Image (cartoon, helix red, strand yellow):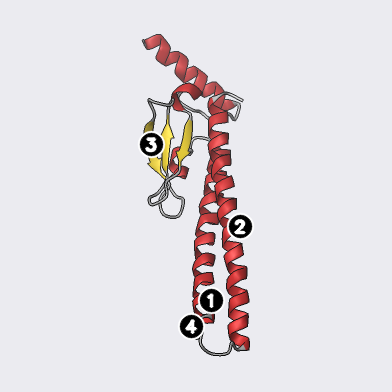
Amino acid sequence: MRLASVLLIVAASAAAALGQPVVPCTYAECGIRIEAAIFSSGAILQGPPGAEVRVGNLGLFGGGLEDVVADVPLALDHARAARRSTVGAAIVSVAAAVALVLATDDVYEEPSGTDVALLAGGLGLSTAGIVLGLQAQRRQSRAVWEYNRALAGE
């Protein structure tokens, strides 16, 4: 047992010296994935199917993934970018909703130039929110992929 501990320390030191992230277990044991949810935050699961363990939640604005992938610098960068995109998508989407509500508050009257501008702005902001949300999902996927790639030793 003591020899295994020494070998683990030596391997971790060698990996750190080579600039490799130090990940404490194999891909089969510690590979992660995100389980999406509709009415709650997504779950971050680790381990093989059927024996996975919940190691975190994505949280309201995509947080939580950063803590799980913190041992792998590139994965951490993608997780941080995903959180920023998620926050941006939420802000832009709220602004779009406000603009659309203001544009349609007097539906029984003839639309004014302001209403048309608000409607166009709301639709543009809504599109931007969708794009930022998709970008956040892509960055989350990349964070998970980089973390799992480090486990596989690539």
Distance from Cα at disc 4 to Cα at disc 2? 27 Å
Residue drawn at (59%, 30%), measured in percent from left and top? 19
Foreground residue, 89 or 22? Answer: 89
Residue 1 is at least partly visible in this image? yes
Front disc: 4 or 3? 4
Front disc: 4 or 2? 4
Classify residue 43 as left or right of residue 103.
Answer: left
Q: Which mark is residue 153?
A: none
Q: Are the residues at dot 4 and dot 2 in contact (C-beta closer than 8 Å)?
A: no
Q: Residue furthest front?
A: 108
Q: Are the residues at dot 2 and dot 3 in contact (C-beta closer than 8 Å)?
A: no
Disc 1 designates what residue?
99
Disc 4 designates what residue?
105
Decide which of tag 2 and tag 1 comes sooner along the chain: 1
Identify the amino acid type marked 3: Val
Q: How many marks?
A: 4
Q: Around disc 4, counting alpha carbons within 10 Å, would you say few (fewer than 14), some (14 to 19), or many (20 or more)?
A: few
Q: Is residue 106 above or below residue 93?
A: below
Distance from Cα at disc 2 to Cα at disc 3? 28 Å
Q: Quadrant of the N terminus?
A: top left
Decide which of tag 4 and tag 3 comes sooner along the chain: 3
Distance from Cα at disc 3 to Cα at disc 1? 39 Å
Q: Are the residues at dot 2 and dot 1 in contact (C-beta closer than 8 Å)?
A: no
Distance from Cα at disc 4 to Cα at disc 1? 10 Å
Decide which of tag 3 and tag 1 comes sooner along the chain: 3
Q: Quadrant of the C terminus?
A: top right
Identify the amino acid type marked 1: Ala
Q: Which mark is residue 55?
A: 3
Distance from Cα at disc 2 to Cα at disc 1? 18 Å
Disc 2 designates what residue?
131
Distance from Cα at disc 4 to Cα at disc 3? 45 Å
Front disc: 3 or 1? 1
